[in-house]
Image (tube, helix red, strand yellow):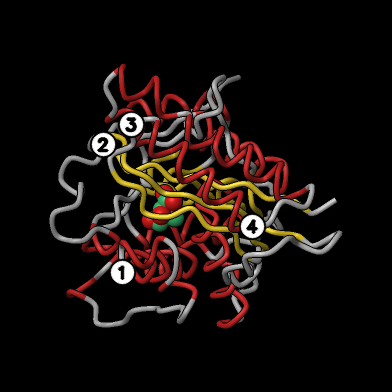
Amino acid sequence: MIKSPIKIRTLSELRAVLKDHRMAGRSIGFVPTMGALHDGHLSLVKIANQKSDVTVVSIFVNPTQFAPGEDLDTYPRTEDADIALLTEVGTDIVYLPSVEEMYPDGSKTDVRVADMSDLLDGIFRPHFFYGVATVVARLFVHVQPDVAVFGEKDYQQLQIIRRMVRDLGFPIEIVGGETYRDADGLAQSSRNAYMNPAERQKANTISSALHRARTRIAVGTPVAEALQEARASIGAAGFERLDYVSAVDPDMLQDLPDGALTPGQVARILAAAWMGPTRLIDNMGFART
Ligand code: PAF
């Protein structure tokens, strides 16, 4: 029988419901989201379902990760459609806290993961990872999950959360879910809905350019040469601004030297670029053959 998730809006109710599950010896899986759910999110919920007895999905558009002038007010809010999708995929609890519930009395406590938050996307959105780390730490305290699942599509975010969990000693297993792609390779994102059909048609250049660069670096092409080609093809496809295309070490996200990788060396290639009003990000992992 298909069962709708229980909707919970307050921390006190969440604690009471989860306490009963814990007392019954059930493990808790958690998928934090900002809603506007798509197949990528649902694939993360399926992982949480496999790895735990009870799955909690949070939907909270977190104001602290938006800078003034960004899309906080227009970010899609589709609660009923989200709950219908979560019902189909199977979810026990949807946590829908208010801003006051997440940040009571204006809250003065932030979580900052130094260095890793200030590179790549952090250069262009300096506030962003501080807001993400702060809200994810708070959500972890609210839900106290055994396992939490995040998409690899937001690879820098995933690594920052892994580091935060390690530094603060949260007893939580962090699992990365593979990026979910449309048939033409475009990574699924709630913000893809902002693109018009002409923009959407060109948007997959970002994934094809990364794919080609990764293939070239993996067979020994110098990093700088492959990245240069990727930048040129993204620019030629009609992206208005290219924030970065970088190849980094997959753990601490430090830029790799310009030359060829050594055999067996692992790497991650990441990009962010603007298609009209939409900022797209993508990344891929690989190893030098
Ligand atoms: O990836 C997201 O949707 C958000 O950054 C997250 C992790 C839910 C924090 O607001």
Disc on the earlier residue, 2 or 1: 2
Residue 32, image x, y percentages = 47, 51
SS at mark 2?
A: loop
The residue singled out by tag 3 in the image is: 238
Mark 1 against mark 3, which lies toward the viewer?
3
Do labels 1 and 4 touch, CB within 8 Å? Answer: no
Disc on the earlier residue, 4 or 2: 2
**Residue 48 in sight from this viewpoint:** no
Q: Residue 39 or 125: which is nearer the viewer? A: 125
The residue singled out by tag 2 in the image is: 77
Decide if residue 158 is on the left or right side of residue 194: right
Q: Amino acid at mark 1?
A: Pro
Disc on the earlier residue, 1 or 4: 1
Q: Establish whether ligand 1 lies closer than 8 Å to the Cβ of label 2.
A: no
Residue 1, image x, y percentages = 61, 19
Disc on the earlier residue, 4 or 3: 4
Q: Establish whether ligand 1 lies closer than 8 Å to the Cβ of label 4.
A: no
Q: Amino acid at mark 4?
A: Val
Determine crowd level at label 4: few under 14, some 14-19, many 20+ residues with C-alpha closer than 10 A: many
Compute the Cα span from label 4 to label 2. 40 Å
The tag on residue 126 is: 1
Do labels 4 and 3 touch, CB within 8 Å? Answer: no
Write the residue at 65% across / 66% down. 249
Write the residue at 54% across / 75% down. 164
Residue 267, image x, y percentages = 69, 59
Mark 4 against mark 2, which lies toward the viewer?
4
Mark 2 against mark 3, which lies toward the viewer?
3
